[in-house]
Amino acid sequence: MSAAYQLNSIRFDYGNKIVLSLPELKIASKKVTALIGPNGCGKSTLLNLLAFVEQPNNGDILFFDEQVKAEKLFGYRQRIGYLPQKPYMLRGTVENNLKLALKLRGVPKDCWQNRTSKVLSSLNISHLKTHKAASLSGGELQKAALARILVIEPNVLLLDEPFSYLDQASNQLLQQVISEYLHEMQATLVFSTHDRLQALALADDVISLVDGEQVKSPLVNLYHGTCKQHVFSTGKIDIVLTSDITECQHVSVDPHEIVLSRQALVSSIRNQFQGKVSAISDEMGKVRVAVDAGELFQVLITYEALNDLKMQLGDQVWVSFKSNSVVAF
């Protein structure tokens, strides 16, 4: 699989503080990659590096197999649409902003009206065309700023918390618009989110960051505790680990790796916990099930599995997962 980005021995510092330390990181082209992690973990900094608005203190970056050079940064940026966490618009109307973006990219003027109308309609904000940018609400600003990106048709989208200011209906619309754009343009998307289950449901690949370093964990079903003789104790439940894990302070379990059942499984699976269903919700075409089994487990299943289990809120179910499904760090 070809890479949109290849990062090697990357380090980025703010003063004396190391914000990012990534020995090796590859981001696939024509795929969706999600960045997850707590506040201050380096997600926005990594997006700034990928957008070429910041340069690493050490290391090198390949962009579509080409070694990134300072004198070519402008050309790289022309291929990227970057939506920061707090987007800004220039003075004037929403339409003015979109047409200026087209002008700066050298798009012929006779294409402006069609492109502008198409993207505003797709985001359901045609009514904002003549509104002053300064008058927009947070959600409107988010959509208008995204429209300004999509109208120039970049082949890489970098979105920092794109769903932050949106209600559920707008959230779903934005996902649909982005998905259709990626399919039509065969583009690459990298986005950050605090909603880890959303990341797992939407993305082809998930990059988890903790204190500026990549960890091989989805950071969902994340528990803190102590490890002794291959057993991890959270203080509420004991999770059996594989025999090669002898020391760790955190464990996590991928929600796709958890099996839900009405009865305890007759199986060699060593981690089985009985609990109560506390929430059931849609998660981008999948079902998010929360089960309180001493610790709270978040599970992603299909609607077919939900129907087979005939599961409702308050039901008693079993949560089961293999030892090798547990990531320890």
Image (cartoon, rainbow, N blue to C red):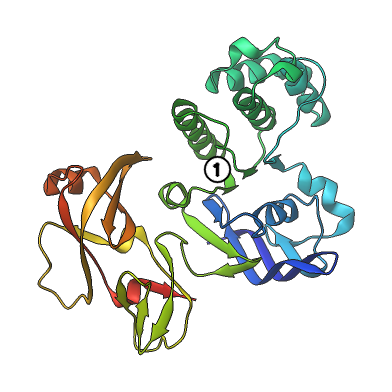
- Label 1 sits on a secondary structure element that is loop
Tag 1: amino acid:
Gln
Of residues 189 and 19, the one drawn nearer to the viewer in this rendering: 19
Q: Which residue sits furthest front?
A: 235
Residue 304 falls left or right of residue 263: right
Residue 56 falls left or right of residue 94: right
- Note whether 227 is above or below 254 in the view shown: below
Q: Is residue 285 visible in this depiction of the protein?
A: no
Q: Quadrant of residue 129?
A: top right
Q: Residue at x 74, y 19 (%)?
A: 133
The residue wearing badge 1 is: 186
Of residues 127 and 179, the one drawn nearer to the viewer in this rendering: 127
In the image, residue 276 lies at what x, y percent?
A: 21, 53
- Note whether 97 is above or below 57 in the view shown: above
Q: Which residue sits furthest right?
A: 71
Q: Residue at x 46, y 62 (%)?
A: 218
